[in-house]
Every structure is written in structure tokens, then in C-alpha cells.
Image (cartoon, coloured by chain):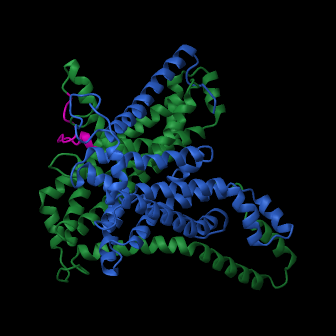
Chain colours: A blue, B green
Amino acid sequence: MTTFWFIRSPRLRALIAVLVIAVAVLIFGLPIIVAALWSLVDPDTGWFPPAVVPPRLSLANWRALMAVPEMAEAFRLSFTVASLVTVLSVVLGLPASFAIARRNLRHRRLIELLVLTPLMMPSVVPATGLGSIFIRLGLSQTLTGVVLAQTIVVMPFMIRIVTATLSGVPQDLIDASRNLGAGPWRTLRLVIIPMIAPGLFAGALLAFLGSLEEFILTFVVGMPKIQTLPILLWAYLGGRSSIQTYAAVVSLALLAPALILLFVAERVLKTEHLAAGFGKA
Amino acid sequence: MTNGLTDPHRPRQSRARQSRAPKSHARRGRALRDFIVNVALLAPACGFLFVALAVPSVQLILVSFGLAGIGAKVGFTVQYYVAVWQDVLFTSAFVFSLRIAAAATLISITFATILTALLQVDFPGRRLVNVLCKVLLVVPSLVAAFMVLTIIGPGGMAARLLKPLGVIWPSLLDARSGIGIVLVLLCNSVPLTLLIVPAVAAAIPRDVIEAARTLGAGPGRVFLKIMLPLCAPGIGAAGMLVFIGCFGSLAIPSLIGPAYPRAISVMMTNEFLRRGNWGTASVVGVAMIATTAAVLAVYHRLAEAAGLRNR
């Protein structure tokens, strides 16, 4: 879409460029710099207004990331939960995506609605219901409970993204593979999976990141035993007691994997697929 | 969208033509096999989602009526409903959350629509902006909240930078209007709208816009008469997602905002986490589901009516 139907004057376009990029830099650059500065504040001197830069910098807060047990633990836990949720979402979601995209379903609308429901409900509601059930089942404050709860809100994105990709696979290729004697499994392995790999990757990535940042269900089901990074960040932001410097460290530690994964996957993440994941069309 | 390329009938029809004699029998067998395969494919995900959504919802409704309660005596009662209805803390929280969600939704869809229009212009650096939109999407919401707080919070960067200029930065975060909460919620909702609205705009055929331009429509007219109507479904869907997300948001309103009124999710979770009062919390949950369903129904109606009028 390299069109410029909107404005043809080059000067006006340059003005828009400057304006948009200035706003973008302000939105992205400034907060990251401020957050980085907060994470480097020397705990002995602090950083009080009206100073625009901290008087002394140190790496003490970053060392705390490994030294404070709850931070190291939250780090480990967050990535464990995110991996488990991603695997569970793929295992449960892939067959369903296939059925929705390529099979002749009688109640397609109903099934699509069911998949969309977790996105159309404030997640504090299922969290409350699950919270009281999990107490009975003994799943409250356990890793299993948190993984199951997160999968509810994460899997729909996965299913929708993979469904969108799967419906783009030309039927001719599948027919050709079958005609040439490949069985359904062989076709799946050699034709369908390679063709949908980008979408599958995008879905898994979004599931991973979605789990990494999930707050409400983890909070209700897991607190206080299961503390993932967002829960700890919430605690440092004032949910328990405000520790701005630790909040900065946890924020950057949580942001880094998201950005790394995004840059690794930038080419694969087609906006249309992601948009489909969020209920477009 | 899916129908163009998928054609599950084709191989079956050709096979059916070959074996005409035991027609109905074979067809029924095949239908049964298809059904079993469909169920097997769908059962894991849909079964999980159904159980994970239906059971808690039923539980919520039962508990709200005093049945199946935890640590409370069991028996049908509407006392929790009466209590919530009469408690001004809950009713004002409800209105507060609705207001916050409406404000965040309006601001983020307006912003996304304007930016989408600007992104149609081929200016240098447009690709960079596109990439930055994706970056925004993966920023965890609490991290974004932290970053906004370090800028606009008390003693934040904005206050520090403006002080030498003699400007006193207003204390936004605990403002009674909830503007602080809205500002922080926007950093989660804007990326969501920025994902959906431009994707819908990209699907507008170029010919339509070219034709309009050739026939003498100015940029403003193209925006109002072509882009906006054709993007409306996407804008609406994005708006609904943002509204629901903000209406039920918990992390941010529990950290900032006025002492009264609190957001409804905060009231609700406090009720069972601090007081163990699952009955009252469940009533609030039922009310939230009802509100969301009503909002979605109204939206659906409006969208349908608008669609009919366009035709």
C-alpha cells in the first residue's frame, strides 16, 4: 500500500513525517530513557525531584534482580508458565484451527463465538469463577492452576491467527499431495505445516507474550504463592509497597524478551494475521 | 473470507458420482465419519474453553444467589443483590468504570483512525511508524503503565522538566475524574486499535480511492466518505475490545486513581480477596457479564442497522 491518495504536496508530506516521527520518538524514546535511568539509580543517594538526571548511577538494582529471591523466582516462574501455556495452546488449538478453517462444520458460527468469548468478557469475571472453583479443586495457588487459567485467555488469539493462516492454504496443493499418494498425516507434515509455519509461529509468539504479561487471572488464581513478573511489578508499583527502582528493573526485564522476540519475528508477523487474532472480520 | 479457497466438497462429490448404487448408505457413513473427525479435532480446544467458561459462570451465578457458597451458609437468597444495589460504593464504582471505559474507547479509536489516515500518506519514515505500532503491541501492559507513571506521575519527568519553566504539573493520577487511569489505560488500548484499524484500511481497494480522487474529491472528502465508512466495522470491533478490556481492568485502577470511587473490578476483587465475601463479588461479576452482553448487543444492533442503511 504505497499510495498517497491523501495528500499530494511533498512539503505537506514531509511535515507529516516530521510530526509523526517526533511524536513516536517522544512516546518511545523518553519513557525508555527514564525507565533505564530509574533502574540505574544509586540506592544510597536516590533520585528526588527536581533533579532531571539521577545524581549517581549504579548497577545495584540490576544485581538485586538476581540477588533478591522473589525477583529471580518470578523470572523463572514467568518463563516456565509462558512456555507451558504456549505448548498447551498449540496442542489444543491447532486441531481446532484446522477444523474451523478447512472442514465443513455445521455450527461454525457457534464454535467461532465460543472461541471469541474469552475476548468478549472482562477477564476478571472468569477469574472470579475459576478462583472459587480452584479453591475447591486444590488448584488455587498452584502452577497448574495458573497455566490452565491463562490458557483460557491466550488460546483464542492462537486459534484465530492459525485459522486465518490455514484458510489461506490453497486447496489445490492439498489435493495434489493426496492425489500423488500422500496420506493425511504426510500431507499435514509435508504440505500444511510448512505452509502455515509463519502463522503458527506468530500465534505461538503471541501466546507466549500474552502469557508473559497476563495479570488478572494470575493475580486471582495464583496469589500470593505464584508470583509472576507482572504480579511482582504490580507489587513494586504500589500494590504492596512502592519501590520505583525495582519496578524499573522488572519492567525492563519484562520488556527485553518481548522486544527481542518481536525483532526476531518482525518479518513473520504479518499485520493481517495479528489483526485476525484480535477479532477483526 | 475463508470460503474462497477452501472447498471440502470437491473430492467427495467426485467420489460420490462414481459409486451411485449404494448412495444413501455410503453417504451416511461418510457423514458420520466427517462428524467424528470434526468432533475429534474440535473437542480439545472447544471442550476446554466450554468447561473453563461455563463452569465458572454457572458457579458465579449460583454463588451470587447464596448457593454453592464457600464458607457461607447455603440457601437461596437475593440478599447479595440487594446489598450491592443499595451500596453506593458499588453503584458509583460501576458508573466510574463505565465512564473510564467509554473515555478510553473514544480516545483510542479517534487516535487510531487519524493515524491510519496519516499512514495512507507515503511519507518518509512510514515503515518505521508501522514497526513501532507492532512494538507497542508487545509491550506488557504493566510495563507501559510503569513508563507512563514515570512521566506523568507525581515527581515524574513531566513535572521535573516543567518546573524550571514555572509550570506546576497537575496531579493527574488521583484525580476524581479518573483521567489518570484513562491516560495509563490508553497505552494498552491504543496499540490494539492500531493493529485492527490500519489492517482494515489496507483492505480498501485502491481503485475506489483513485476513482474518488480522479473525480475531484479532496483528501478530507475521501477520508469522510470512503475511508471512514469502509473502516467502520474494524473501528467498531476495535472499540468493543477496548471497551471491554478497560471496563474490566484491574491492575491499573488498583494502583492509581481516586480513593472514591474505585473501579468495579477493584471493588470486586477486594471483596473476595480481603473479606472472603464471594457472594457479593459474584453479584458484581454477574452484573459485569450482563453489562458487557448488553453493550455487545447494542453494538451489534447498531452495526446491523448501519449495514442495512448502506446497502
* Camera-nearest residue between A28 and A42: A42
Q: Bounds of the magenta span?
A: B169-181
Residue at (55%, 29%) from the top-left corner? B126
Is residue A115 visible from the viewing direction of this image?
A: no
Residue A127's quadrant in the figure? bottom left
Q: Quadrant of the C terminus of chain B?
A: top right
Q: Is residue A54 left or right of residue B230?
A: left
Asked whether residue B204 is drawn in magenta, I would say: no
Answer with left or right where residue A41 lies relative to residue B130: left
Q: Please say whether residue B81 is visible from this viewpoint.
A: yes
**Depth order, front residue of B43/A22:** A22
B141 versus B201 height, above or below:
below
Instruction: Give the percent coordinates (x, y) of residue B217.
Output: 56, 22
B228 over A272 or under it: above or below: above
Tell me what residue is drawn at x 55 percent, y 52 percent: A276
Q: Main secondary structure of the magenta part?
A: loop
Task: Kindly identify the residue that appears in the image at 31 percent across and 80 percent down.
Answer: A136
**Position in image of residue B161 (x %, y %):** 27, 25
How many numbered marks have been drawn onto this rendered protein structure? 0
Please state the horizontal and vertical placement of residue B307, each as a whole percent of the image.
Answer: 50, 46
At which x and y percent is residue B33? 69, 80
The residue nearer to you, when weighing A223 against B80, is: A223
Residue at (78% x, 71% y) in the render: B12
